Each structure stands twice: as structure tokens, then as C-alpha cells.
Image (spheres, helix red, strand yellow):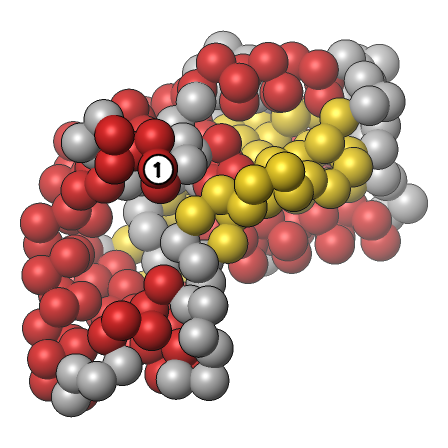
């Protein structure tokens, strides 16, 4: 079985032992592919006739205005930049099958939580929560924990590629946070992306994200091109 099949099969096993929704937490560094992997797991579960939804912890980031007031814009993505208690309350309610839940929305285009926005989360068999802080914030609450791992060099490469792509898209979108960078040439954009990685994303990875790998039931190791090289089951 591939990594998605292994995780979806383990989630299904957990579902057979409980009447509550199963909570699957997927964590890993910025740009490691958490959103894509979580969506693939949910799709695999839906094909097994289960009700599965993906929730991103990004929606539980504090608004940029609040982060700015607290001097935390340079710490965005670090543990203190999230409303962790709100995330935990949401996770508990989702596991209990609450019928009135709304998932807060974060926009990677505007680089902020969308005020007042939210999509309804229907009662599910399995809820896949993905985010850099998913394992740490939901420790003791998740039924199955997954960590996506990769070499720091590959992670930096993927982050730079994503940053450059967002800047290119911003040329056609005046609402984009990345619009402010479109007049920079390619070398300057790449230097800015690498500086952001070195001074923000890498310290967050080493200090807060990577340590949660020890909480994972399953570690998925990726190599260049996001190819899965190994799947380790720890529990």
C-alpha cells in the first residue's frame, strides 16, 4: 500500500472501535504537502463510503491585525500565533458529531483569516485536520497522528517555488498579499523567499514542528519531487 492507502486504512480501523468521529491529525513543515496529502486521504475514505472532511489549522490563526498589535507578524505560524483553545474546542465538537460547526477560512492569497467567512462542517465519520501545529495542538485528542517529513533542503526548495508562484499569480490579482513584491526581479524574489525560510520557517520547524514527529503514529518520509520514500509506523 502507498502512504495514502496506509493512513486511510488505519483511520478506518480506528472508526470500527468508536461511535465518535475519528480525528486524524496531519502535521509537517511549511510546503511539505500537508494540504494535498490530507485531501488525498479524505478522498480515499470517501471512496470507501465514509463521510470525511479536511480542516486546516490555518483558519485558527489569529487575524493579521491581532498579530500586528501583539508584535507577532514575524512569528506567524509559530504556536503563539494560533487560537489553540478555539482549535481544540472545534476538534472536540467535531469528534462529538456537532451539527452546527463552521470551519474558519484562511486565504493564502490575502495572507489572512477571512473575516466572517466559514464553511459548514457536517457530521463526519472522519475529520482530517492538517497544519504545522496539528500534532502539538491536538496532542491527546487525535485518534491517528501523521507527520510528513523531508530533508530541510527539499523543504526550502518547495517553499521558494511556492513563494515565486504566488508572486507570479499576484501580477493578475490586486487583492493578493504578494502583490507588493511583483516589481522585484526574480533574483530578489528568490532572495526574499530564502530569507523568510531561514529566519522564520526554519526556526519554527526546528523548534516547534519537527519535535512533534515523536507524537506521530505514522511518519511519511518524502524526497525530491514530493516522492514518498518511506512510511514508518510507530504505534
Q: Residues within 10 Å of mark 1 (few under 14, many from 20)?
A: few
178 on left or right of 197: right
| Quadrant in the picture for residue 131 | top left
Q: Residue furthest right?
A: 49
| Quarter of the picture holding the N terminus | bottom right
| Quadrant in the picture for residue 176 | bottom left
Residue wearing tag 1? 65
Q: Nearer the viewer, residue 128 or 197?
A: 197
Q: Nearer the viewer, residue 60 or 204?
A: 60
Q: Residue at x 16, y 56 (%)?
A: 197
- Residue 40: percent from the left, percent from the top? 65, 56
145 on left or right of 152: right
| Quadrant in the picture for residue 150 | bottom left
Q: Residue at x 15, y 57 (%)?
A: 196
- Residue 153: percent from the left, percent from the top? 16, 63
Q: Residue at x 53, y 22 (%)?
A: 87
- Residue 69: percent from the left, percent from the top? 25, 30
Q: Residue at x 85, y 22 (%)?
A: 99
31 on left or right of 45: left
Q: Nearer the viewer, residue 124 or 119?
A: 119
Amino acid at each position: 500500500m502507498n502512504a495514502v492507502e496506509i493512513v486511510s486504512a488505519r483511520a478506518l480501523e480506528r472508526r470500527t472501535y468508536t461511535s465518535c468521529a475519528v480525528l486524524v491529525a496531519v502535521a509537517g513543515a511549511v510546503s511539505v504537502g500537508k494540504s494535498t496529502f490530507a485531501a488525498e486521504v479524505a478522498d480515499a475514505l470517501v471512496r470507501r463510503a465514509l463521510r470525511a472532511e479536511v480542516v486546516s489549522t490555518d483558519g485558527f490563526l489569529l487575524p493579521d491585525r491581532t498579530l500586528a498589535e501583539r508584535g507577532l507578524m514575524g512569528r506567524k505560524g509559530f504556536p503563539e500565533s494560533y487560537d489553540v483553545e478555539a482549535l481544540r474546542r472545534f476538534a472536540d465538537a467535531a469528534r462529538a458529531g456537532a451539527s452546527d460547526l463552521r470551519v474558519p477560512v484562511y486565504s493564502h492569497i490575502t495572507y489572512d483569516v477571512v473575516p466572517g467567512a466559514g464553511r459548514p462542517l457536517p457530521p463526519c465519520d472522519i475529520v482530517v485536520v492538517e497544519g504545522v501545529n496539528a500534532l502539538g495542538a491536538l496532542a491527546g485528542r487525535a485518534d491517528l497522528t501523521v507527520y510528513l517529513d523531508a530533508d530541510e533542503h527539499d523543504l526550502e526548495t518547495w517553499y521558494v517555488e511556492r513563494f515565486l508562484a504566488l508572486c507570479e499569480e499576484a501580477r493578475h490579482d490586486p487583492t493578493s498579499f504578494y502583490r507588493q513584491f511583483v516589481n522585484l526581479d526574480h533574483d530578489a524574489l528568490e532572495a526574499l523567499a530564502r530569507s523568510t525560510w531561514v529566519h522564520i520557517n526554519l526556526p519554527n520547524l526546528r523548534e516547534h514542528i519537527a519535535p512533534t514527529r515523536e507524537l506521530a503514529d505514522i511518519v511519511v518520509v518524502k524526497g525530491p519531487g514530493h516522492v514518498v520514500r518511506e512510511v514508518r509506523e510507530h504505534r
